[in-house]
Image (cartoon, rainbow, N blue to C red):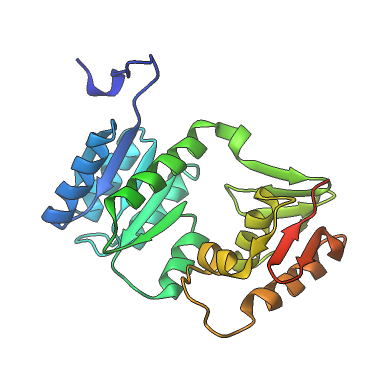
Amino acid sequence: MNRWNVTDVCGGTVGRVLVIEDDERIGRLVTRALEGGGLLTERASSGTSGLDAALRRDFDLVVLDLMLPGLDGRQVLDRLLERRPDQPVLVLSAVPEISTRVAVLEAGAADFLGKPFAVAELLARVRARMRGASTGDAGRWLRIGPVQLDLHRRQATVDGVRVDLPLREFLLLQHLMSRAGRPCSREELLADVWGLHFDPGSNVVDVSVRRLRGRLDRPDRIETVRGVGYAYAAE
């Protein structure tokens, strides 16, 4: 039987994931975890072979290491998205710098997970990204009133006019809009938008909210919730 035509017990198509990872131990761990979660996997151990596989076959998700022999992960990401701009890619890397995470997200990666990682978190992120991919255009747009986000291209428009947002401001707006009407704490925003699981002792959230308010048609679209944080006003 052709492995790419397998269906699950509910009759739906089984998800297909390409894992590009040169470390044998981590590669086995990731593929076993994904297969244990009911997914079909293929593995490549170099950037060159991984890019070739990603362009020859259709995958619901590519899990990509950054430090690879041959082409490095960033080269693979750039060349893959140049040919297949809608391909979801989850970058899995031991590179610790926040600047690296920002760079790959700005380049078009759907997600970034640092090493070492918990298998449960890896599976949760893979499932979340595959759900987003399976919804097609229905999962691409987030709109409340005149404000619309293109989640694939990370672009925002207000009344049809494009508003250029830095990555952090876009992610902040996406987080708030996806939870419209619900207060979001500063701790929650720091963790989800900046990847910080501690308070750095700065007002980075408040400064970013202030800048974001200035870019929208009305600053009161983002409300201050005293003693908690912020909330995007539901229409």
Q: Is residue 126 visible?
A: yes
Does 154 sit left or right of 46 as displayed? right
Residue drawn where x is 62% and y is 56% of the image: 175
Residue 57 picture location, percent across and down: 32, 33
Quarter-of-image position of residue 3: top left
- In the rendered image, which quarter contains the N terminus? top left
Residue 180 picture location, percent across and down: 72, 50
Q: Residue furthest front?
A: 227
Q: Is residue 209 or residue 61 the one in the foreground?
A: 209
* Vertical comparison of 43 with 228: above or below: above
Q: Is residue 87 visible?
A: no
Residue drawn where x is 34% and y is 40% of the image: 55
* Vertical comparison of 55 with 212: above or below: above
Residue 68 picture location, percent across and down: 23, 61
* Vertical comparison of 137 with 183: above or below: above
Residue drawn where x is 68% and y is 73% of the image: 208
Quarter-of-image position of residue 123: top left
Number of disc labels: 0
